[in-house]
Amino acid sequence: MNELVHLECASAARLSTATLAATVAHMEREAAVGPGIAYAEADGVLARLRADLAALFGMRPDQVALAERATRALADVFAAWPLRPRARVGVVRAEYGSTRMLLEAAAARGEVEVVELPVDGEQRIVPESVAGVDLVILSHVMSQRGVVQPVREVAAVGPPVVVDVAQSAGHIDVGGLGAAALVGTSRKWLRGPRGVGYVAVSDEWAERLTPRAPDLDTAAWDDDRPRFAPGAARFHQWEGTIAGRVGLAHALRELHETGPAVVARHAAALGVAARRRLVDAGWWVGEPVDEPTGMVTFGHVHHQSAEVHARLREGGVAVTLVPVGRALDVEAPVLRAAFHTYTTDADLDRLLTALPRT
């Protein structure tokens, strides 16, 4: 069999050889001198990591903190938000299932009211609809559909917006979105190791957020009361896989050296080509054909997605099977292919050739 064609970077991208080496080297250093010394030695690398993340967002390094994962980061930010009782929190039906569960649990406790916001025919949020809500939570690109949401237009309407950039950072422009806060993960388009998340908070909101679970790394005692660290540092999680953070730092260096715009053009070109060829072959796609993302969701009226997924894997092509429940609008499993700089035209040929004939 030929080498596996990996089209799953929207789940977790392949590490580069150099990123893998940097990650392993830190683990080896931990074994040699102990995790504490190795952590101290990596201080400069981790500072550069925050700076490189901030550069993606058009922000300062002190506005960025490291976390365990995107879902945990979002939960911490949401818990800290200064919401009035029964505040109206706006979300679209297509929002990532874990995020929606977080909001519905808060609603069940009587803390907030979840407001489902309308979308247009391309499944983009209607910006004007956010007027009157107290907070908007929105994924820049959904997990089950490669459509870019109009975050800048939503933020311009007025309510603060917390944006999940897990599926956009690294291959879609995430600079200057106007968001109150951003959360994301290492393992997708950034090509970092699993187990690293991040949160970025604007100056307008950072000092107004009160973390629910401060600790000795994010706060200090002030007359027997916690005084929170300034800015985003109040959300920093000291405990974590430091080797993964070192690996992400290396992956981000590679991204900036390549150029985010270069990655964006390559991924989007493959996305557009894949959609055109899929449609020509009789498959439906979940995005406008010319959508500028490297994520393509697709299916067929005569073929079960689970069976196609298994067939592709047997043929050496790895795509993702998006299950029911990933979001409330996913009523049947769909297939998802995602392209990065290591994806070639030949890989796309392999995908189309391996699909069952229609």
Image: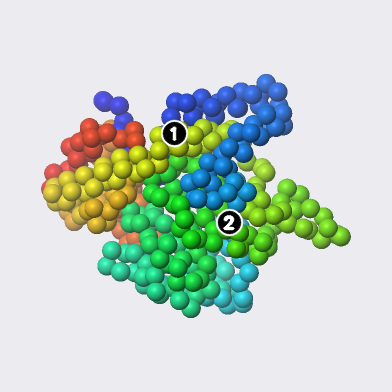
Q: Residue furthest top?
A: 32
Quarter of the figure with residue 234: bottom right
The answer, for residue 161, to whether it is visible in the render is yes
Picture quarter containing residue 191? Answer: top left
Write the residue at 32% across / 64% down.
123
Q: List the single residue furthest toward the right.
A: 223
Residue 203 place in picture, x, y as percent: 61, 59
Q: Secondary structure at mark 1?
A: helix
Residue at the spot 31% in from the left edge and 30% down from the top edge:
4
Q: Position of residue 221 (x, y in %)?
A: 82, 55
Marking on residue 201: 2
Dot label at residue 321:
none
- Whether residue 72 is visible: no
Report which residue position mark 1 lands on.
257
Q: Residues within 10 Å of mark 2 (few under 14, many from 20)?
A: many
Identify whether 261 is placed above or below 283.
Answer: above
The N terminus, quarter of image: top left
x and y, in percent, of residue 269 in the image = 26, 43
Which residue is located at x 61 percent, y 77 percent? 85
Question: How much space separates mark 2 and mark 1, taking CA atoms?
Answer: 25 Å
What residue is shown at x 26% (from left), y 39% (from top)? 312
Instruction: Judge the density around disc 1: few (<14), some (14-19), many (≥20) Cα neighbours within 10 Å.
Output: few
Q: Is residue 206 above or below residue 276?
A: below
Percent x, y of residue 17: 44, 26
Taking depth in this image into account, of 330 and 226 the one nearest to the observer is: 226
Name the kind of residue labelled 1 in the image.
Glu
For badge 2, the amino acid type reads Val
Q: Secondary structure at mark 2?
A: strand
